[in-house]
C-alpha cells in the first residue's frame, strides 16, 4: 500500500514539473517568423553571359541579381532572423546527481537525482525577441537600400561608359574634319596659293586630336571595367573592347516635385530602417521594465534511500527584485535611446526632403543647359565651321580661322554629349532619392505619344564635313 502511494506521489510531481516546463517553453505571444529567408527577390546566381548589345535596364537587373555585396547583406539578413527565437529561449535545465547522508562505513547512503528549471514570471522573453526582430527588420531594410545603391551605381557606370563612347565618336568626327582641313591646306600649298605653315599647322592639329582619341579609347576600357565590376562580373571575364551599349533613354522634363516628395517619404528604405531602430529602442525599454518582475525556479527530484525510505522532491522558488537602482537606470537609458532614435528619424526625413528638392533643381538646370546646347549653340557652331571651311577653300580666310571654328565645334559637341550624360546621371540620382517616382525618358515619350528624342543614328548630309557620322 505504501509503495502504491509513493508511486502516485512521484507521478504527480513529475507531471507538475513537466507541465511547468512545457508551459514556459511557449510563454508569451508567438514570435513572428520573417517574411522570407532574407533573400532579396532579385538575388540569384551570378550572370556571366552578357547580351551582344547591353541596355541600361538589363545591366541594372544583372547587377542587382548577382553582385556579391548584395548577397553578403542577404546572408546577414537571414542570420539576423535566426536571433529572435534564440533570445526568447528558456535557460537550459540543470540536472544534479548526488549522495546524501553517507556514513563513514559506507552503509546506508541516500542517493538523489534533481532537475532544476528557471523561467521568468514576466514577458521578458517576448520582449527580447522583439528587440532582435527589430534588428532583423533593420537588416532587411538595409538590404533594400543597398539594392537601390547598387542600381544607382550600375546606372552611373553605364552612363560613364556611354559618355566615353560618345566622346570617341565626336573625336573621330573631329579627326576627320582636321584631316579634311589638312588635305585642303596641302592642296593649296601644291597649287601655290597657300604656305607651308598652313600644312604644318593643320597636321599638328590633326595629331593632337588623334592623341585625344587614343586617350578616350583607353578611358573607355577603364569605364567598361567599372561597369562590369558594378554588375558583379569580373572585368577579365569579357573582352572590354567588345562591350556594346544601347542608347539609354533621356528624360524630357523634370518630374513633379510634390509627387517625388511623397514617393521619397513612402518608399525610402532608410526611413523604414530608422523606424526599425526606434522599434528596437522601445522594445529594449520594455525589456528593462520587465526586469522589475521576479524569476521563478522549479525543482523536481527523487531520492533513493538504502533504508527503504525513497522520496520525491518538488520545490518552487521565486526571486525578489529588491535592488531597484540599476533597474531604474536601465529604463531611463532605454527611454533616452528611444527618444534619440525618434529625433534621428525626424532628422533623416529633413535630409531626404532636402536631397530630393536639391536633385530636382539640379536636374532642371541640367535640362536647360542640354536643350540650349542642342537647339541653339550646336547648330550655330556647325554653321560657323561650314562657313569657315568654305571660306578657307575660297582663300578668303586663313587656316587659323578654320582651325578655331573646328575646335569650337569639337568642344561644343563634347559639351553637349557631356550634358546629355549629366542629365541622365542627375535623373538617376533623383530616382534613387525618390524610388518609384514618376516615369520619364522613353516611357514618358511612349505614354505621351510624342516623337522620340534625338538618337545617335548617323544622318546623311551630302558632303558637309561637319555632318554627324
Image (cartoon, rainbow, N blue to C red):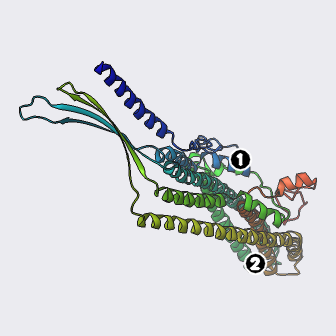
Question: Residue at the location (66% across, 61% down)?
Answer: 271
Circle 1 residues within 10 Å: few <14, some 14–19, many ≥20: few
What label sits on residue 327 in the rendered view?
Answer: none
Relative image position of residue 367 (x, y in whole percent): 82, 69
The reply to whether discs 2 and 1 touch (Cβ–Cβ < 8 Å) is no
Instruction: Give the quadrant of the C terminus.
Output: bottom right
Displayed quadrant of residue 279 = bottom right
Estimate the x, y position of residue 143 in percent, counting from the top left.
Answer: 60, 52
Q: Which residue is mark 1?
A: 58
Residue sitting at x 84%, y 54%: 442
In the rendered image, the vertical position of residue 171 relative to residue 18, given as above or below? below
Q: Is residue 281 left or right of residue 442?
A: left
Is residue 182 at least partly visible in the picture? Answer: no
Q: Earlier in the sequence, mark 2 or mark 1?
A: 1
Quarter in which the N terminus is drawn: top left
Nearer the camera: disc 2 or disc 1: 1
User: Can you name the residue that lies furthest to the top here?
Assistant: 1
Give the image quarter of residue 457. bottom right
Q: Residue furthest front?
A: 1
Disc 2: which residue: 198
Which one is in front, 140 or 284?
A: 284
Q: Secondary structure at mark 2?
A: helix
* Image location (x, y in percent) of residue 342: 62, 66
Categorize mark 2 by other alpha carbons within 10 Å: few (<14), some (14-19), many (20+): many
Q: Position of residue 252 (x, y in %)?
A: 85, 62
Relative height, residue 429 to residue 59 (above, below): below
For label 1, the SS is helix
Nearer to me, 303 or 143? 303
**Residue 304 vs residue 360, the one in the foreground:** 304
Q: Is residue 422 left or right of residue 241?
A: right
Instruction: Give the camera-side residue of 51 and 423.
Output: 423
Distance CA(mark 2)–CA(mark 1)? 50 Å
Amino acid at each position: 500500500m505504501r509503495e502504491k502511494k509513493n508511486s502516485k506521489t512521484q507521478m504527480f510531481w513529475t507531471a507538475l514539473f513537466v507541465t511547468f516546463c512545457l508551459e514556459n517553453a511557449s510563454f508569451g505571444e508567438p514570435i513572428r517568423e520573417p517574411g522570407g529567408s532574407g533573400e532579396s527577390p532579385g538575388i540569384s546566381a551570378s550572370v556571366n553571359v552578357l547580351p551582344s548589345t547591353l541596355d541600361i535596364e538589363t545591366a541594372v537587373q544583372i547587377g542587382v541579381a548577382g553582385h556579391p555585396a548584395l548577397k553578403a547583406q542577404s546572408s546577414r539578413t537571414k542570420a539576423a532572423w535566426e536571433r529572435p527565437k534564440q533570445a526568447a529561449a528558456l535557460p537550459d535545465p540543470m540536472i544534479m546527481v548526488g549522495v546524501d547522508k553517507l556514513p563513514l562505513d559506507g552503509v546506508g547512503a541516500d542517493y538523489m537525482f534533481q532537475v532544476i528549471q528557471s523561467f521568468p514570471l514576466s514577458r521578458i522573453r517576448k520582449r527580447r525577441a522583439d528587440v532582435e526582430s527589430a534588428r532583423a527588420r533593420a537588416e532587411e531594410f538595409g538590404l533594400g537600400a543597398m539594392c537601390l545603391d547598387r542600381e544607382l551605381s550600375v546606372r552611373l557606370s553605364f552612363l560613364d561608359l556611354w559618355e566615353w563612347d560618345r566622346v570617341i565618336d565626336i573625336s573621330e568626327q573631329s579627326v576627320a574634319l582636321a584631316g579634311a582641313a589638312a588635305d585642303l591646306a596641302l592642296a593649296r600649298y601644291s597649287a601655290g596659293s597657300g604656305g607651308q605653315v598652313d600644312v604644318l599647322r593643320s597636321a599638328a592639329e590633326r595629331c593632337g586630336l588623334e592623341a585625344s582619341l587614343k586617350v578616350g579609347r583607353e578611358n573607355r576600357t577603364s569605364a567598361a571595367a567599372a561597369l562590369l565590376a558594378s554588375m558583379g562580373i569580373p572585368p577579365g571575364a569579357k573582352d572590354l573592347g567588345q562591350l556594346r551599349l544601347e542608347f539609354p533613354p533621356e528624360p524630357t522634363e523634370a518630374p513633379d516635385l510634390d509627387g517625388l516628395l511623397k514617393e521619397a517619404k513612402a518608399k525610402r528604405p532608410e526611413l523604414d530602417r530608422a523606424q526599425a531602430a526606434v522599434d528596437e529602442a522601445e522594445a529594449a525599454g520594455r525589456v528593462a521594465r520587465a526586469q522589475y518582475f521576479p524569476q521563478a525556479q522549479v525543482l523536481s527530484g527523487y531520492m533513493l534511500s538504502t533504508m527503504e525510505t525513497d522520496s520525491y522532491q518538488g520545490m518552487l522558488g521565486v526571486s525578489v527584485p529588491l535592488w531597484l537602482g540599476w533597474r531604474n537606470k536601465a529604463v531611463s537609458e532605454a527611454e533616452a535611446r528611444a527618444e534619440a532614435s525618434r529625433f534621428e528619424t525626424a532628422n533623416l526625413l529633413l535630409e531626404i526632403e532636402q536631397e530630393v528638392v536639391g536633385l530636382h533643381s539640379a536636374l532642371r538646370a541640367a535640362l536647360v543647359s542640354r536643350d540650349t546646347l542642342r537647339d541653339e549653340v550646336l547648330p550655330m557652331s556647325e554653321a560657323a565651321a561650314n562657313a569657315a571651311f568654305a571660306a578657307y577653300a575660297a582663300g578668303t580666310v586663313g587656316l587659323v580661322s578654320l582651325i578655331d571654328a573646328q575646335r569650337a565645334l569639337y568642344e561644343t559637341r563634347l559639351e553637349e554629349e557631356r550634358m546629355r550624360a549629366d542629365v541622365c546621371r542627375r535623373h538617376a540620382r533623383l530616382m534613387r532619392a525618390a524610388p518609384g517616382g514618376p516615369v520619364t525618358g522613353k516611357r514618358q515619350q511612349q505614354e505621351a505619344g510624342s516623337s522620340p528624342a534625338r538618337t545617335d543614328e548617323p544622318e546623311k548630309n551630302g558632303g558637309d564635313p561637319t555632318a554627324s557620322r
